[in-house]
Amino acid sequence: MILVTGATGCVGRAVVERLISAGHAVKLLWHWNHEHPVPRRVTIIGGDVRQPETLKAAFTEEGDIDTVIHLASIRRESDTDAFDEVNIQGTQNVVQACRDHKVGRLITMSCLGAETRSPYPLHRSIGRAEEIARGSGLNFTVIKSAVVYGEGDWLTSWITGMARSLPLVMPTPHSGQTKLQPIWVGDVAACIVRSLSTRSTFRQVVPIGGPASMRLDEIMATTLSATGRRRRLVRLPTSMTHQLAGFVARFRHALSEPEIEALAYNRTTEIGAVHRMFGFVPAKMGAKLDFLRPDALKPELNVSLRGWPTA
């Protein structure tokens, strides 16, 4: 049986669906007091990676765990969630639970730009989590992904949120020249699931990205086109981006000021890495944005577990 943490996130949902389609027995560590759509044919147990006792229950109840896919993380801190507690200590708790219960296989995610010396707290925390996985002594795989898009992602949610708030123009940070390599969430999920049996990924950090490097302004134009919204891109140079970061951060699904600052840095990897490692070519961005259409179907089955308090 495979235990998945972070199963309600953008990547987690796609991974769980693909695992079920492939016939795997799947158990989800379901964060208390959260309600999300969930597929059928899975085992659900409430818990939190910050709480070792709930991890113990997840490993011991209803089936033997042989692999953990650890995807639980946060992108933004709040009064109840901190990078150190969720991204770093949560990963350490999962690693320790694997050791305690003799689970040797761990697959987890990182992102391009995640380094322990990064100037950005989010990337520092993910870099530290990656370091913990590498030093765990387990048979690990770290999928180090380029920016991911799909239903519930931060990238297209931010762009469409600004478009709903601004009727005519779209402010584009850093002149729109930052190079990213967006990869569809379904392709990320395929890489994660194929890592289960791809020996070349064992004890490796595996960088992946989409089929092309794209400038930020190209990504914004592609996303707007998929929604049917027409906006004039106003390219703000980096100096003006710094000055107006607070203004840009006000809109629906807005990025925080540090997240907008972080968009100044290119984050790309080898074109063709996915094909070389996993044997398929990832989709072009324009072909996988149907979820942005107003008439896109949404999952109907929701699950909410009540238990451990969030505050």
Image (cartoon, helix red, strand yellow):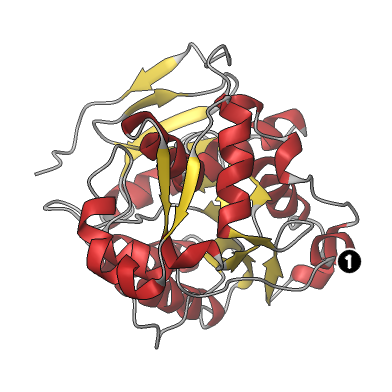
Q: Residue at x 45, y 42 (%)?
A: 159
Whether residue 89 is situated above or below residue 253 in the rendered picture: below
Question: In the image, is 137 to the left or to the right of 61?
Answer: right
Whether residue 62 is situated above or below residue 153 in the rendered picture: above
Quarter of the picture containing the N terminus is top right
Q: Write down the residue under mark 1.
A: 276
Question: In the image, is 166 to the left or to the right of 198?
Answer: left
All told, the count of numbered labels is: 1
Whether residue 66 is situated above or below residue 273 in the rendered picture: above
Q: Residue at x 87, y 60 (%)?
A: 275
Question: In the image, is 3 to the left or to the right of 280?
Answer: left
- Front-most of residues 154 and 299: 154
Q: Quadrant of residue 31?
A: top left
Q: Residue at x 42, y 61 (%)?
A: 173
Q: Residues within 10 Å of mark 1 (few under 14, many from 20)?
A: few
Quarter of the picture containing the C terminus is top left
Question: In the image, is 111 to the left or to the right of 211?
Answer: left
Q: Residue at x 77, y 46 (%)?
A: 284
Q: Is residue 102 visible?
A: no
Residue projecting furthest to the bottom: 117
Indicate the amino acid at tag 1.
Arg
Q: Position of residue 107 (x, y in %)?
A: 60, 60
Q: Position of residue 233 (x, y in %)?
A: 49, 48
- Front-most of residues 2 and 286: 286
